[in-house]
Amino acid sequence: MDWRRMHRKLMGPQLAQPRLTANTNASCNTVQRKGFAHCLAVVRTASPGTITPQQSGPPATALGPADIQSAYKLPPTGGGQTVAIVDAFGDSSAENDLAVFRSQYGLPPCTTANGCFRKVDQTGGTNYPGDDPGWALETSLDLDAVSAACPACNILLVEGTDNSLNSLGVAVDEAVALGAKFVSNSYGAPEDSSELSFDQHYNHPGVAVTASGRAATGLPERHHHELPGQPGHRRSRRGRRPGQRSGHLRHPRADWLAAGGRH
């Protein structure tokens, strides 16, 4: 996926936009074996099961950063604060894709060069894991979500070696060790008897460790109660679905599936 080429096309004549009528799980949002997590990205697509980059840019109905900030009444603060994103596998185009999103919506640049963006492996180094297209989609969604909610925040991306709960837990610990006071985890795995062995990774006093809430998976109902979103010392993200009506935002009390990755 060449986002730089897509960005150049965005700057040119607008192309016809297809109707997006289906919900398609990203390739990483499938049932995994015990001890491994799935991502939570669900993409709005023109046809079921087919994810195609839309070179015409966001659809007219897309909600942007201003809508998210309005819906949640978020203050224009956050400068100097670091939000960490923990995801599995690598995303070598993460910074470039982030630049496209922020440029599209007029947000200030967040780059390695200006100190706003930093990417590390799960031990804090630069031995990044290999790319995975499904998890890369989840990663970009998470980076965009942080940018939308807090354009002034610094972003730390910690890439787990793989999607095992052990690797992701180590990545959370590393995010905290590097100074993040907010750690986002957009992945899940069904609860089982081994969950307490991973609990330590998500218990960091003074740090807001968040995880996606129930019913945000796009998977069968038995997967709606998942790790790491259950224990009480971390917050399970759900949310609301902002909508447009007569030119104004409305905020019904419904679960906003974007809290788990709906794009």
Image (cartoon, rainbow, N blue to C red):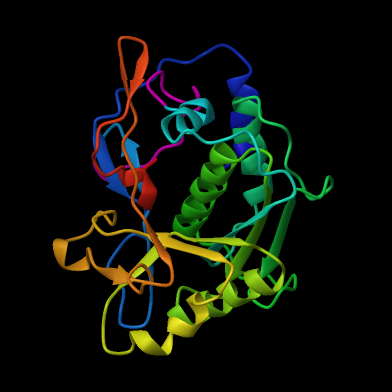
- Vertically, is 37 above or below 217? below
- Was residue 141 drawn as part of the magenta stretch in this picture? no
- Vertically, is 64 above or below 167? above
The answer to which quarter of the image holds residue 217 is bottom left
- Vertically, is 224 above or below 25? below
Residue occupying image coordinates x 50% and y 32%:
69
Q: Is residue 88 visible?
A: yes
* Left or right placement of residue 155 versus residue 165 in this view: right
The residue segment tinted magenta is: 48-62
The one of 47 and 190 positioned closer to us in this rendering: 190
At which x and y percent is residue 157? 63, 59
- Vertically, is 222 above or below 105? below
Q: Which is the main secondary structure of the residues drawn in magenta?
A: loop
* Left or right placement of residue 203 versus residue 256 in this view: right
At which x and y percent is residue 154? 70, 49
* Left or right placement of residue 263 versus residue 254 in this view: right
The one of 224 and 78 positioned closer to us in this rendering: 78
Q: Quick one: quadrant of the N terminus?
A: top right
The one of 190 and 161 positioned closer to us in this rendering: 190
At which x and y percent is residue 166? 48, 83
At which x and y percent is residue 128? 67, 69
